[in-house]
């Protein structure tokens, strides 16, 4: 049995209304598409029309947003009065695109404007008092924040004291007490009437631009789409319209910087989707802010110089590659430091780059299913980093009860950022473990994974996957559908990738086949060979040489029932310990030496079924590994039946190659007998290898044959010297107990080494 990495949320049985089904049929859509729409709360003809036909007409009046009129009036006053304006943004993709839109809008109005994105390692997130002071001293008369500001109390209070107005445009969570700003433009402001509260920072900036320019500016829609997708806000309502129209606009963009970024990212603009932005463009924008000064990204989007655009796009690509290398290194190191007994992983190390710790925490959480906090230890004795959590644990709420341990702390239920004295780390770990235990929070289920539908392989077609695209753009609150495939078998399993880290295979069910790709599952190729396989994934189309085929992008899999792993090849002999709780069994003490030393120390030597029963009762193992083959194969079955094992590894090593060598032929025994007869004394301690070579008998077999002769009294052996016995009792080889025992061993090895895994599994379960 193999548990899924995620906590699968299976679809509920639902009944679509007759009217809705008729509407689906009228549009030429399959009932399954109708079911997916219904699950997304699209349940009337009117809702269906809005969802399937997103357009600019669905955008709301920007003046419904709190303080919009006041903000526009103040900006117009600044433009007319030639006041110097500063646009103060944020260092992520949302902040970069927000800043670019606000800057270019003000330039269109003829304003005197400059912009600044804070460096996360110098100014940090949000309004920075020291920087505000510097700019005010330089003559800035109006500050407009984009994608930040609602938590900037100190800097905004300073600006007000200096007689400089600050207009905040933001979308982040509103604090209980708002800062002293001239205007706060926010879609969820309690005193506003805006009907859609999930705009990204770039969406709010676009609304301000629309109000200032008195029309929705089409030239900014490409940036709106990028910022909205990259910030992972809800892709429903107004955001769905903005992203849909923005993606189309992006295919014909006139921004030299965006064209250069497409080229650097190997992106074909004609094939742009939200996935392209989310996995190719967004990460490159975020990378520069994670590692360095983010301001060149705004210059990239604004430049009219092709050479500058190419240079800056290459810079962003370089930073993204650096970011990936850093994340990979830290993730590997952090995983090795995990202590499984902890309820929440708290991992700290000196020298880790603080700009990527949120990504690392998310990766570890997804891999282990447990909330994770990753910190870097700094020279000043502090520890700084990020945390990510599953739905089972409100990380912000838990850490709020421990805030006396922190010097800085903020976030929401699923993600936090914090700084603390390093000396408090042990206390934090203990308090988190205690919190989870006392609250009886179940963290064993893993990260939730919503499954939209259970499909049979035969139901998948290129046409069906094309129909799925009507649900796009996919993202938060409108995810790409995930499908569960059950009662399937696999074939053509191949490890692919530069480090063999991915898998490619074929799913089969009722004679129908489906190609599958599983990124990051390379080490689990053998798992897929088991029966009882269930796979969850997303459907896509693989196009090669003009031919289109359905393909499943695997997200997770599980296996029901007993799993057998075929480790009968010699390359598995030196595998590390599969699990601390695993039971390793050998039937010959000497065979322990084929294993790694650390593994060999854990091996139990079989003595009797009663002894095994006691060992299993004490250790309670769920995994079992057979190092070698017993004298009779029935012993394997008897041990397996002692407990409910979920995973059994069949090493079945035969260092002496008993089955291959047999018991020796009549001709081989004659050769040995003749050799002994011709040599009165034979040194078998040091020269057995030379004798084996001379007689052309495998060394292991020769040693066995000599042992048989010794048991039957044909020879004597003293101090490693063999002598023949004159006139020994004439008796057949079959009288030897060793000979009979080897015959049984051969029969056992013949079955255990030559049978395929399904045959052995059926035998074990019979």
Image (cartoon, grey):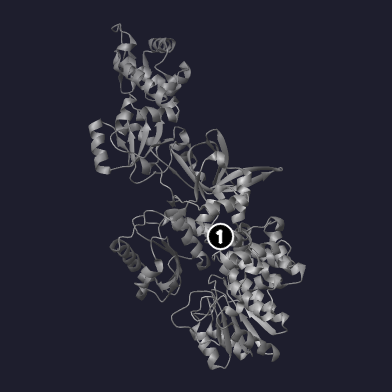
Which residue lies at the image location 68% right of the left edge and 83% below the top edge? Answer: 113
- Is residue 500 visible to us here? no
Left or right of 128 in this view: 593: left
**Residue in front for this viewpoint, 669 or 127:** 127
| Vertical arrangement, residue 329 with respect to residue 419, above or below | above
Which quarter of the figure has residue 433?
Answer: bottom left
Tell me how many marks there are.
Answer: 1
The residue carrying pointer 1 sits among few (fewer than 14), some (14 to 19) or many (20 or more) residues within 10 Å by Cα, namely many
Left or right of 3 in this view: 472: right
Which quarter of the figure has residue 215?
Answer: bottom right
Q: Give x and y (percent) for residue 327.
A: 53, 60
Q: Secondary structure at mark 1?
A: loop
Which quarter of the figure has residue 229?
Answer: bottom right
Q: Give x and y (percent) for residue 273.
A: 64, 57
| Vertical arrangement, residue 706 with respect to residue 457, above or below | above
- Is residue 642 visible to us here? yes
Name the residue carrying label 1: 475
């Amino acid at each position: 049995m193999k548990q899924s990495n995620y906590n699968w949320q299976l679809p509920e049985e639902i009944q679509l209304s007759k009217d809705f089904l008729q509407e689906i049929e009228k549009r030429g859509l399959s009932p399954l598409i109708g079911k997916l729409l219904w699950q997304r709360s699209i349940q009337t003809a009117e809702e269906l029309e809005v969802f399937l036909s997103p357009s600019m007409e669905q955008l709301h009046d920007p003046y419904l947003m709190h303080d919009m009129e006041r903000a526009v009036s103040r900006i117009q006053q600044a433009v007319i009065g030639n006041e110097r304006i500063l646009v103060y943004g944020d260092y992520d993709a949302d902040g970069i695109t927000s800043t670019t839109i606000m800057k270019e809008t003000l330039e269109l109005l003829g304003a005197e404007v400059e912009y600044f994105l804070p460096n996360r390692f110098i100014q940090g997130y949000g309004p920075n008092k020291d920087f505000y002071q510097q700019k005010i001293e330089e003559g800035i008369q109006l500050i407009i924040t984009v994608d930040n500001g609602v938590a900037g109390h100190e800097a905004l209070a300073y600006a007000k004291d200096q007689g400089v107005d600050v207009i905040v445009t933001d979308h982040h969570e509103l604090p209980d007490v708002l800062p002293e700003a001239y205007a706060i433009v926010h879609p969820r402001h309690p005193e506003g009437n805006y009907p859609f509260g999930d705009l990204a920072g770039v969406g709010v900036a676009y609304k301000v631009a629309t109000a200032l320019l008195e029309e929705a500016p089409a030239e900014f829609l490409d940036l709106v789409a990028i910022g909205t997708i990259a910030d992972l806000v809800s892709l429903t309502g107004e955001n769905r319209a903005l992203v849909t129209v923005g993606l189309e606009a992006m295919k014909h963009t006139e921004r030299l910087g965006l064209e250069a970024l497409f080229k650097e990212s190997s992106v074909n603009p004609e094939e742009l989707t939200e996935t392209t932005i989310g996995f190719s463009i967004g990460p490159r924008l975020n990378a520069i802010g994670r590692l360095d000064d983010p301001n060149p990204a705004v210059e990239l989007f604004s430049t009219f110089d092709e050479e500058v655009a190419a240079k800056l796009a290459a810079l962003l690509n370089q930073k993204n590659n650096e970011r990936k290398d850093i994340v990979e290194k830290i993730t590997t190191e952090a995983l090795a430091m995990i202590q499984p007994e902890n309820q929440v992983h708290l991992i700290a190390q000196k020298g880790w780059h603080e700009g990527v710790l949120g990504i690392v925490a998310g990766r570890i959480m997804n891999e282990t299913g447990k909330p994770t906090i990753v910190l870097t230890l700094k020279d000043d004795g502090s520890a700084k980093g990020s945390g990510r959590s599953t739905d089972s644990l409100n990380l912000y709420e838990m850490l709020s009860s421990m805030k006396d341990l922190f010097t800085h702390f903020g976030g929401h239920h699923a993600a936090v950022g914090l700084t603390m004295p390093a000396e408090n780390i042990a206390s934090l770990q203990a308090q988190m473990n205690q919190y989870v235990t006392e609250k009886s929070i179940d963290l064993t289920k893993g990260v939730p994974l919503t499954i939209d539908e259970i499909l049979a392989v035969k139901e998948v077609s290129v046409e069906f996957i094309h129909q799925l695209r009507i649900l796009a753009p996919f993202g938060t609150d409108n995810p790409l559908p995930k499908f569960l495939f059950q009662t399937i078998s696999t074939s053509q399993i191949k490890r692919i990738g530069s480090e063999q880290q991915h898998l490619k295979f074929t799913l089969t069910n009722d004679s129908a086949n489906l190609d599958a790709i599983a990124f990051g599952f390379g080490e689990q190729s053998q798992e897929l060979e088991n029966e009882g396989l269930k796979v969850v994934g997303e459907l896509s189309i693989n196009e090669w040489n003009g031919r289109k085929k359905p393909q499943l992008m695997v997200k997770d899999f599980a296996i029901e029932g007993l799993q057998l792993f075929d480790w009968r090849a010699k390359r598995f002999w030196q595998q590390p310990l599969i699990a601390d709780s695993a039971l390793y069994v050998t039937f010959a003490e000497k065979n322990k030496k084929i294993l790694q030393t650390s593994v060999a120390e854990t091996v139990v030597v079989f003595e009797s079924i009663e002894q095994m029963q006691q060992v299993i009762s004490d250790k309670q193992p769920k995994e079992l590994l057979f190092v070698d083959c017993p004298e009779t194969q029935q012993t394997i079955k008897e041990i397996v039946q002692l407990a409910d094992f979920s995973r059994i590894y069949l090493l079945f090593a035969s260092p002496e190659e008993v089955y291959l060598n047999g018991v020796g032929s009549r001709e081989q025994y004659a050769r040995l007998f003749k050799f002994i007869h011709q040599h009165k004394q034979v040194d078998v301690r040091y020269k057995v290898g030379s004798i084996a070579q001379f007689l052309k008998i495998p060394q292991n077999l020769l040693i066995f044959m000599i042992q048989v002769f010794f048991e039957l009294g044909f020879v004597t052996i003293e101090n490693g010297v063999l002598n023949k016995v004159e006139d020994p009792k004439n008796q057949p080889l079959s009288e030897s107990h060793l000979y009979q025992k080897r015959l049984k061993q051969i029969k056992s090895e013949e079955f255990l080494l030559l049978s395929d895994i399904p045959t052995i599994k059926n035998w074990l379960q019979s």
